[in-house]
Image (cartoon, rainbow, N blue to C red):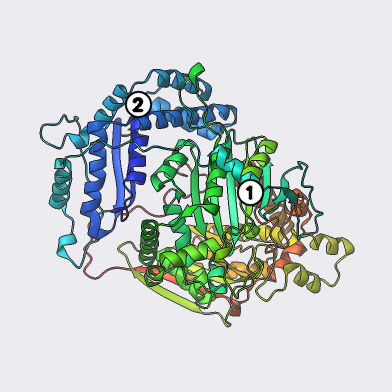
Amino acid sequence: LARRICLAALQIRLNVGGRSDDPAFTFVEFNQLDSAREGCAVCSLDMTAEPNRWYEAVTTSISEIRKLGLHGVTPGEMERYASALLTDAEQLAAQGDMISHSDQLAYLMETVANGHTFMSPEQSYAVTEQALSTLTLEEVDAAAAELCSHITGLKDGEATSTGVVVAVACTPKSVSDPALEVDDDKLCAAIREACAIDVEPVEDVVVPQTLVTDDELAKAMEDHPPKWEEGQFSDGTPNTPADRITRPFTLRRLGNGICVGIAQNAAESQRGHLRLVAPGGRDAEKRLGFKSGALAVGARAMQEGGSFGRFSREQVELFAVDHLIMVEINCNEEALTMDFVFPTTNVGNTGYGDEKQLGITGTESVLQIVREILVEFNWEEDALNRSKQSYRTAHESLGKSLEGKSTEMIMEAVASGDERFLSIDVDTVNAVTLDDAKNAVMSQLMPSDIELSLSGDFVVNDVLDMILQYLGTVPADANSEYKVEGKETTSNDFSGVPALQLPGKHLDLELEDSDPRAVAYVAGAAPNAWGFLADGSTVAQRVGDADKRASDYDKQRRAHPLFANAALSLVSEIANRRLFSTVRERKQLTYDANFSLTGFERMNGGWFLVTVTASKEKAQAALEACKETLEAMQTSNPISPDNLESAKRVVLNRHEGELRTSQYWATMMSGIQEESVPLKGPLSVTDFHAVIESMTTRDLQLTLDCMGLDEVELYTAIGKTVQPEGLVDDGIVKASPMAGVGRGGALKG
């Protein structure tokens, strides 16, 4: 436990304190684990950095490790991470009888292999609480000294550990500046120089117990009295009451316009998931005239920032750490999405046993964070710089990846170069200013455009009261100053995907890489997740027009809002099975074939994409086999009743399994009250089983006809690696990519 407190403290220091205005590393992680294979405990520092900053990255990370080893943890860190460990153990104990057999078995095997003591989650919690109640700061500091001794011992005169210290660096083979090259001597010298630097103890950061005080909340309630209103839907469902709990979820709107969906899910004990969705995304950049990339870069800057009102970034991030909250903010083609994972119990507690003082619940903490994002978020230049660096690194990595570059190439072709669907290049990223990012993101966060979906192991009435207090008091005109003048658009004014240019074409790509391999793609037009095509027509309309002999029952079934979504799910599953059995098992041309749909919810239209990985020699044959498989589904080998029944089982079982997760509930509720997703409503959840079970082979065959599967409509691509000039065979035998991928085989996983 003392070691785990040290590890938590160091990891947070590296990621919170070590992230300066311009951090040297793009990723850093320090860990220790007992390795059965090595027969010892292994401490590891993993990090990535830009080639020109490797020395600085090594120095910064080693200095942080030395600080911990020489000066230990602060009293605040001791209290914070001991509380987090106890809460973690408590959550595991609450889930004790719901842990899967495979997870239990893996834990048992690891325990036996490492000579640990096997305990049930309940026993582990009891022992953890007992041990933490007697653990002292001196014992934790001693554990820190031992944990870091392999680093601190590299300086003359400091105690060292026995054992091997291994440093491994993966670096570019050639760089323009010889000073940037890394070799054994330079790496070892950098480590020793970093260990010679004197380090000072870390100062404790004062972490707030709450982000919104009782007085502030009382004033907000007085200035902007909150109220509940009925939930409204576009799928034909009657309005839901503003004063009653409904099953399986409660759907309402706040007086300021925020849509709220809440569902209780006891399957994940003491855990919750909150999703905030603001429709717009990269489509809004184009539609509202923002600088290209502004919303995407701004969303990442918000993730990298985190300063609210009077609280600094460090204080807010440590508040989230104290309350075990994980936050992820993303911008995709059609929405700005914020996901929060949190405990639903009291967290940030102090003391043990009868002397324990409870903090606020994780649910209340996360609602405070959401409120602060909407009304008191501070935009900072250093957060924007980290966001830009992240996007630059991602784009440069894409250009070096065979799969990434090939996917980008075919997406550029089918999307006619529309930048909404492509990665953001370095020049575009560099052009975004702080004001560009701020104006773009905040223009999406007006209460009337926001939908909040919340699921977890909590009492629904209690959480509804918290939402009313924290989010119902957000002014209805919050962030209205960022509204784009002259662009009076509603949230459902989404552009469709570009019309596919016909005829389709074939593309080839070669990328220098010492590892010979290839990837092939087949792409074409498809509906969006709810059956809308790029021209505005729907799958239901086209199926109805094509089936002149449809019975009244057929017409009624196909009129259900979920019809197209269900049909596309089943078609996707059947296509995947067909590709696997034909291209891999029967023709043995590939070791992986996958059919996927872009699945946009708000934009009309989309694409399907078949991805095949193969050897260079078999890539063309694998591509042709995929095209033949898709053509056969429409003509010579249509969807059979057996195909349909097995696909129904898979889709329903997947749905049943995912219903145990709060994240899935939050995802299902997102969009239910949005006008921009007109067919998604409560029926999409309550009628899911019935609609899937009612599907016929005729339904799926006619749905297939709505996709661009004809030869003339297909876009294809093959990406291959080519050997770099002057490559010398190193004599190392590469593992066959076929090894270990047999379905259900002994090597699986």
Q: Position of residue 144 (x, y in %)?
A: 28, 30
Residue 126 appears in view: yes
Q: Position of residue 364 (x, y in %)?
A: 57, 39
Q: Which residue is mark 1?
A: 223
Q: Which quadrant holds the N terminus?
A: top left
Identify which residue is drawn at 35% across, 52% down: 735
Identify which residue is drawn at 37% across, 64% down: 392
The vertical placement of 182 against 500, above or below, is above
Q: Earlier in the sequence, mark 1 or mark 2?
A: 2
Q: Callout 1, which amino acid? A: Asp
Label 1: element kind:
helix
Residue 658 appears in view: no
Tell me the CA gap for discs 1 and 2.
Answer: 48 Å
Q: Which residue is mark 2?
A: 2
| Residue 540: quarter of image | bottom right
Tell me if 675 is positioned left or right of 397 in this view.
Answer: right
Q: Position of residue 270 (x, y in %)?
A: 58, 33
Q: Check disc 2: other Cα within 10 Å, few if <14, some if 14-19, many if 20+.
A: many
Report the residue that reaches farthest toward the left. Answer: 156
Report the residue that reaches farthest toward the right. Answer: 552
**Tag 1 near tag 2, CB within 8 Å:** no
Label 2: element kind:
helix
Q: Position of residue 587 (x, y in %)?
A: 52, 62
Instruction: From the viewer's side, name the closer residue of 74 and 478.
Output: 478
Identify which residue is drawn at 79% across, 73% down: 546
| Residue 278: quarter of image | bottom right
Tell me if 243 is positioned left or right of 139 in this view.
Answer: right
